[in-house]
Image: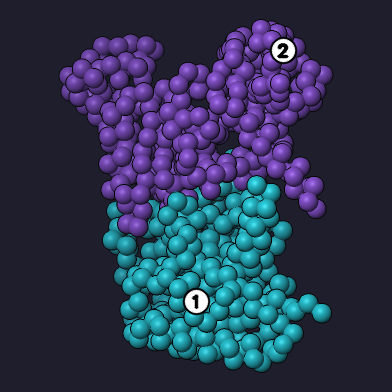
Chain colours: A cyan, B purple
Amino acid sequence: MAKTGLVLGVDIGGTNTALGLIDREGICHGADSMPTRGDQPVQEFFRRLNERAQGLLGAVGGGFELLGIGMGAPNANYARCTIENPPNLSWNHVDLRAEWAPYFRAIVAATNDANAAALGEMRFGAARGLKDFIVITLGTGLGSGIVVDGRMVYGSTGLAGELGHLIVDPEGRLCGCGRRGCLETYASATGLLRTVSELLEGGSRATELRDIPRGELTSRRVFEAARRGDEVALEAFRITGEILGRKLADAVVFSSPEAIILFGGLAGAGELLFGPTRRAMEANLFPVFRGTVKLLPSGIQGNAAILGAAALGWEALAQGAQTSRGDGKG
Amino acid sequence: MAKTGLVLGVDIGGTNTALGLIDREGICHGADSMPTRGDQPVQEFFRRLNERAQGLLGAVGGGFELLGIGMGAPNANYARCTIENPPNLSWNHVDLRAEWAPYFRAIVAATNDANAAALGEMRFGAARGLKDFIVITLGTGLGSGIVVDGRMVYGSTGLAGELGHLIVDPEGRLCGCGRRGCLETYASATGLLRTVSELLEGGSRATELRDIPRGELTSRRVFEAARRGDEVALEAFRITGEILGRKLADAVVFSSPEAIILFGGLAGAGELLFGPTRRAMEANLFPVFRGTVKLLPSGIQGNAAILGAAALGWEALAQGAQTSRGDGKG
């Protein structure tokens, strides 16, 4: 009997790295995690990662085979299959295929976290059956993965889809990229906190947020306050959604997606964020696109980052097969 | 001997319709034009268009055969192969395949003028060999055609790529679409004239433009004045390029193109427009994209609109062939 194919999905984070064996249907046949230890040499990281992967493969037994490896990582370049100057890691330039070569002969593909999330939604989540959609990841920053006609947009540099760096206001908030007014300085967990700070400084409304020491204020606490009806917290979500919705309206004229999926920590705020975002997007859409774009939550159950990375591996396998067929014809 | 294949390229304009027979290499084997007469029934238009096409085909003789028809038209929907509520034409909804059916059995494809221009640049012009680029058409309005990984972006509605309706300023100039501050109200021939009007009203600088009656002011006259060193005319081009460049920087984070091609009447102003546009784009780019995007003039010789429409026909033929091969495998 033919063996069941698996892809190893790996999500490299600044602190922890998660991995899992995912089949074609998105079922996880074993998962693990380990500290990333980005201060140590990258070869050491791959030695440990291989040990964990071998452990998972040993546990599933002989009825399975590893076909591919998909990796989501900060500053991963899809075109070159590299990680380049990742923030919070000491690795500079990592050739992922070369690092895997001593251990596996599987196909290796990598992209950034947001693109992996988009591929995960397309294969296993809210974007199943959709050909044109955008995934917005709302975490510390704002990432995005754009799919056009069923294919991820990587662009000439492999780095396309940086909607977190659309400019909201050229004289606006200072961004980590060195410019001012980038969308992610407003629409992200960090952006929400900056908005709360501005509201606290600019007014004297009663709010429980004023009692929280600055270093302890988190987007979760703003969310909890908003659910209790705290006006400043509600206002902060309204402002965040309003700015996000306006820029999503700009994104729609670009690729006319059927859906925009909000993903990641801040998206867990539900209607507190989705409501104002949807209203602002719809009110600011170019008329022909009104009513054509759904705003959806993620449809991924379980470890979304591993599933997204694995979806990239499955896509690379499908493309490899297609290329082989194409070559055969020529 | 095999016959040489031709595609009929048709560019439907509000006043005139141009057509031509274009071979695979972009060589024109005969062209013609006729009044569009958008006030008359669309069936009458196609009867006349067929007569002209038959005339061109008769003239090239028996060594050629018509394989496809590509059409560029205002409000053309690629996905449905229709024209929908075209401005300045009385036709409402036109099913282009049905209208051609009595006359030809060739493949028919249609898209808007800007997408046709992008396909023309890709096949015959400045984008030959490029896989990721954007064409911006600067005429009465601002149109755009976006190509990602060698394929036109149509989106879920077939209407993607409306960069003329990116919002520059939510409280800005009133746009024909009913919103405020759309890019095309600044960066287009009309936008340039609005900028000139604002400069004339807002200042008393000496300028030859002040002597031109309002109804006679055209972008060409502003261009000519700028070439003679007229300060207001130069300032109007600077402002136009500055706004265009800023929004092109936003477009780059979306698809990371290798090149942006400026096309159409206003692009003929050359460095007067390209200079400030390039500087503003580069200064406002997200750092990883700096130095990665070329700003280019059109590379199309001759009738660009016919060549663009024909390029669409050639693309449809290639895709049809690919689909047939795909079906054969299945």
Rendered image: mark on residue A134: none
- The percent coordinates of residue A204 (x first, y second) are 35, 71
- The percent coordinates of residue B235 (x first, y second) are 24, 29
Quadrant that contains the N terminus of chain B: top right
Rendered image: mark on residue B62: 2
Toward the viewer: A257 or A95?
Answer: A95
Note whether B195 is above or below A130 in the view shown: above
Rendered image: mark on residue A101: 1
Residue found 35% across the figure and 83% down from its top: A41
Is residue B182 left or right of B326 when viewed as pictured?
A: left
Q: Chain of mark 2?
A: B
Note whether B68 is above or below B315 in the view shown: above
Specify whether residue A292 is in view.
no
- The percent coordinates of residue B161 (x first, y second) are 54, 41
Toward the viewer: B305 or B180?
Answer: B305
Residue found 47% across the figure and 89% down from its top: A48
User: In this rendering, do the residues under marks 2 and 1 share a single chain?
Assistant: no
Q: Amino acid at mark 2?
A: Gly
Is residue A81 left or right of A328 when viewed as pictured?
A: left
Residue found 53% across the figure and 60% down from its top: A145
Q: Amino acid at mark 1?
A: Ala
Disc 2 vs disc 1: Cβ atoms closer than 8 Å? Answer: no
- Answer with the quarter of the image where residue A179 lies: bottom left
